[in-house]
Image (cartoon, rainbow, N blue to C red):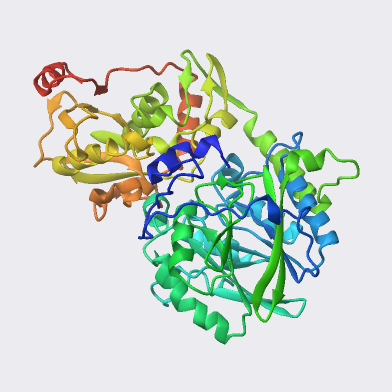
Amino acid sequence: MKRKSKFLAAVAAAGLLVSALSPMVHAHGVQGEAIAPNLVGPAYEKANRPLAETTLTIIHDTHFHGNFGQPDSAENIANYFGLANRIKSEQPNSLFIGNGDDIATSVLSSNFNGQHMIDAFNAGKLDVDTYGNHDFDMGPDRLAELVTKSQFKWVSANVIDKRTNDVFAKEQGAARFIIKEVNGVKVGITGLINEEAPEITTMGDNAIVLDPVEAMKTIIPEMKAAGANIIIVSSHLSSPDARILAEKVDGIDLIVGDHAAFAYESPEKIHDTLLWFIGDEFEYLGEINLQIKNSKIADFNYHRYALKEEAAKEGFAPDAAVKAVMDKYIGQLKEQLSVVIGKTATELDVMKSTQRQGETAIGNYVADTIREYTGSDVALINGGGIRADRVFPVGPLTKQDIMDAMPFTNYVVKIEITGKQLYQALENSVSGLEEGAGRFAQISGIKYAFKAALPVQSRIIGVKVNGKPLDPAATYTLATVDFIANGGDGYEMFKGANFLLDSNNGPLLSSLVTETIQKQETIAPKLEGRIKSLPLAGAQVKEQLQTPA
């Protein structure tokens, strides 16, 4: 089993245990006992278990985060679909199923608003996809537009528009489920998003997420009534939650996809449900061959393909149509982002993990930039919104650098808050330190200290705002981004705040930072002691906070 390093923080937050011999603890939302993986093992590998007859082949999954991969690397989207094409030629009764988190977040996504992924999926003839949390990063309206432009089907059992009590973007072509007849078998396919999605992305006021277990208990009878012989879930649940789903809900034949991006060498089985998790992006592609008799899986085998190995084989060919899409957009992107916008006189640590642990120079710069632009008393931005995963050396900065650092479609806003709300926000900021949660805030106009050893929601020792003690009853203006102002990353204390500058009028964060660097020509951000994380007694920390912010 393998998991990708960039998901370590999310996995730790979910409380997952790596060993397949250890109990797996569920992540968010789905409630139940921890369930250990029950891997079927190599005996069911395709080479070891040929089927007398293959009724249906499932190729899975996507989870590309708006990326194409590198054109000069084996692991890219054109090769991924090329491998899928080869499987289809060998197994003509195939369906290619995605599992969401495909539209965002990436530099490409920020520049092309997700259209590049729809064009690639249309060219590669993906059969079906489901919503992942990152598919909402550009907002529900943009996602609905992209559903309209999709030649494949979007399905979800638990993302509902509360105005219609039906699937989100139904008018644009989405469905709660579809039924595709393959080789005489009616295959019912639906999808599930992770239940905490509204807390970590921008779903708007009308898209809601239902409990996955209850959603499936409702939809399975409907799928069967519509003629489904086999039921497949395109899953954007974390794998521990998918196991609990399989334990609690009868009637699911296959679950593929994992929000937490664990990669297992073989499928697993819980009761009569097969599950398989193969990571994210372009490292692996899964093939499950099913022999179906009397509307049940009578037998199966599987194979996990490593794209790098397959692309190196003689005769391998990428999907030509997908490659044309990839080449087109990457060419356009290079032209747009190669422009030098200024330079930095100090080294900038833009590692994703660093932004979630303490004050950073780049975090200070971004927070200062939005505070100055809006004329606010203070500024706060979630560290999870800064994530280039590299260090910018002293020297020139390009548009590409800034887009890498701030890939989300976040708009700068200004709101009115109370001192009490600001204090609650800072407590929220340091409430997920152990998991490396993205809610950790980079700040401006604020100085505070905290003790991580104290219980959650009681870690803040003292706060100063522009050199003066925080007044819980006072009103302050706060510069932030729309994601945070609308309650994302646990900042629910800001919901309902009065907007002095809303997202319709505020600039895109990455664009504002780019323009600011261009005006200043040279920047030199540094650490300034805005955030103290010291194993000191409370009185000692308060004494340190007497220093003007």
Q: Which is more toward the observer, 105 or 264?
A: 264
**Left or right of 170: which side holds 78?**
right
Residue displayed at 24% across by 30% down: 452
Look at the image and tell me in which quarter the C terminus lies: top left
- Examine the rendered structure and indicate whether residue 357 appears above or below residue 291: above
- Examine the rendered structure and indicate whether residue 518 appears above or below residue 257: above
**Left or right of 32: which side holds 94?**
right
Residue 15 lies in what quarter of the image?
Answer: top left
> Is residue 375 visible from the viewing direction of this image?
no
Look at the image and tell me in which quarter the N terminus lies: top right
Q: Position of residue 345 (x, y in %)?
A: 48, 13
Q: Position of residue 173 (x, y in %)?
A: 59, 72
Residue occupying the far bottom of the picture: 225
**Left or right of 253: which side holds 505?**
left
> Is residue 175 visible from the viewing direction of this image?
yes
**How many discs mark residues in the rendered view?**
0
Residue displayed at 82% across by 47% down: 318
Residue 525 lies in what quarter of the image?
Answer: top left
**Left or right of 252: which side holds 230?**
right
- Examine the rendered structure and indicate whether residue 200 appears above or below residue 242: above
